[in-house]
Amino acid sequence: MPIALENVTYVYAPDTPWEQEALSGVSVEVQDGDFLGIVGPTGSGKSTLIQHMNGLLLPTHGRVLVDGEEVGKDRKALRALRRKVGMVFQYPEHQLFEETVEADIAFGPKNLGLDSDEIAERVRWAVTSVGLPDDILERSPFELSGGQMRRVAIAGVLAMRGTVLILDEPTSGLDPRGRAGLVEQLKRLNRAGITMIMVSHSMEDMAQLVNRIVVLSEGKVVIDDSKRAVFSRLEDLANLSLDVPRVTNVMLEMRRAGLPVPLDVLTVNEGIEALCQVLRGSDIVEE
Amino acid sequence: MLRNSVTIGQYLPGESPVHRLDPRTKILGVLAYVIILFLVKDFLGYGIMAIITALTASAARIPVKMLIRGLRPVLFIIILTVALNAIMTPGEVLYRLGPLAVTREGLFQAAMMACRLLLLIVTTSMLTLTTAPIDLTDGLEYLMGPFRRIGVPAHELAMMMTIALRFIPTLLDEAERIMKAQMARGADFQSGGFVQRAKSMVPLLVPLFVSAFRRADDLALAMEARCYRGGEGRSRFKILRLGSRDVAAGVFMAAGFAVALVV
Ligand SMILES: Nc1ncnc2c1ncn2[C@@H]1O[C@H](COP(=O)(O)OP(=O)(O)O)[C@@H](O)[C@H]1O
Ligand SMILES: [Mg+2]
């Protein structure tokens, strides 16, 4: 289910003193199976952009095409769209409300009008997909740890079984282990065929997960390219006060110090390998 | 957007002479205005009151659109009041529909009521539009000061109001965010009968209250961490002072009110 934004402009609170153009002429395309990353400084319009992808916001100008159909033409199609394109908002744990984890995850499937067997099946699948144990189902979501609440909330969206999943800063505020676990599960979901779109401040997460990155600044797309190509534009990223993964920085420093290491290194493992190769090829090791 | 449909209690930052008036002048002015509004008994009087409002609005440079937007949420109440007045007042019958009769006196009464309500809402919303919430509660605290002697907790009331005003937009934003999150899970807040709709509010209200309490906890902690312990002995960052501008505003209002009462 490809998603395409064509020249989308979005204005908050039009015709008031609080009028604010959050997106100006943005065009972005997402193909099936993609893992798209969206980065940009705070207030650059990332959250506004992703809400166009499942019809929670409709463009002021321009149009959004999902599966070739223009979004917003009729209301019924809008609800169907929201079933297919799941959306995990920032701090999704703030949307939990049921007495048990099970009931909360079942909220979405229930709204779809599924029978109870199907609902139970989906709840179990969703809870496993986010790496939580089965016995958590009986507990109250409000007595869980922050990281567990986050997973429950994501499971609640997964249980809708959409073909596209959008996540707004899913790892922010998680401890390193929670973060690593979540990254792993997101990777697996994408491999299972779900198209993923993720907003994140963490370049580490981007390096591990996405294949394409869109960089937003002041409501405009400034870079839209493959992950490696984006991370090689160090100055552009620095100008937007965005980082590159720490490994990439380490490589850069080594290059400056005179070692002929490659710069398009994104993960620690790649870094180790590249370094070993350089060292083997030179005579530093032998000394 | 939820936030933009609620004008009551909203502040429109500006540098106009009305913005720069002492909040106490504005509060007392509005108070007097409301009292006069209920004393005035004919349309000429309302006309004068409307002129006072219009002059103030233009001095404050508030767009007319904003004022009209503020009326939308209370339109229903106005219509209801007008309708009830038109049919409930005994007198010379103009039109009869079953047991209901529209009377000449009723129509007159209804028109008066409509004028009164419209002016009341527009003028009071002008107070919050031109006064920052902090100034508003500061002013109220000063004005309530003398009543402390008879046990009115002036500072606490003012602080409560400051906090409430501060959090209205925050909670509206929050409500909007939660609503969208639940809509993304297939929730439907718009269709269905009354019971259905009331039920559909649960997934919105529970998280909203949870978050309101969390915010309250955080705020209380933050205030205590900075040694807040009530109004006793607390010094002020901003001292209110009446100036020549306030005298001018006072004279203008007094003159206007006098004319409205006399004609
Ligand atoms: N509900 C809203 N009402 C008015 N303005 C908003 C709203 N949400 C976001 N904005 C404004 O739109 C701009 C983009 O916001 P957002 O999309 O949330 O950015 P990001 O997610 O990149 O931080 C910001 O300037 C923000 O203040
Ligand atoms: Mg955001």
Image: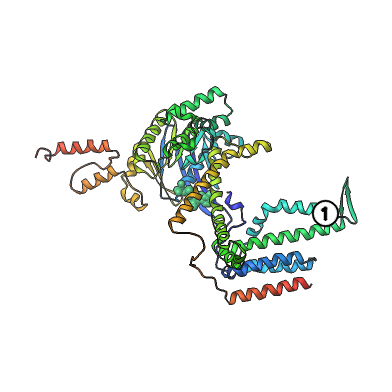
In the image, taking residue B174 as reference, residue B37 lies left or right, namely right
Residue A191, image quadrant: top left
Q: Quick check: A236 above or below B47?
A: above
- Decide which of B33, A154 is in the foreground and name it: B33
- Seen as rendered, the residue at the extreme front is B150
- Decide which of B175, B229 is in the foreground and name it: B229
Residue B125, x across and y down, in percent: 64, 60
Report the colour scheme.
Answer: rainbow
Residue B130, x across and y down, in percent: 59, 64
Residue for badge 1: B86
Q: Is residue B254 visible?
A: yes
Residue A111, x across and y down, in percent: 58, 31
In the image, taking residue B32 as reference, residue A257 lies left or right, namely left
* Picture quarter with the C terminus of chain B: bottom right
- Seen as rendered, the residue at the extreme bottom is B244
Q: Residue at x 43, y 39 (%)?
A: A146
Residue B22, image quadrant: bottom right
Residue A199, image quadrant: top left
Mark 1: amino acid:
Ala
Q: Quick check: B5 above or below A109?
A: below
Q: Residue at x 19, y 43 (%)?
A: A260
Residue A143, x across and y down, in percent: 47, 37
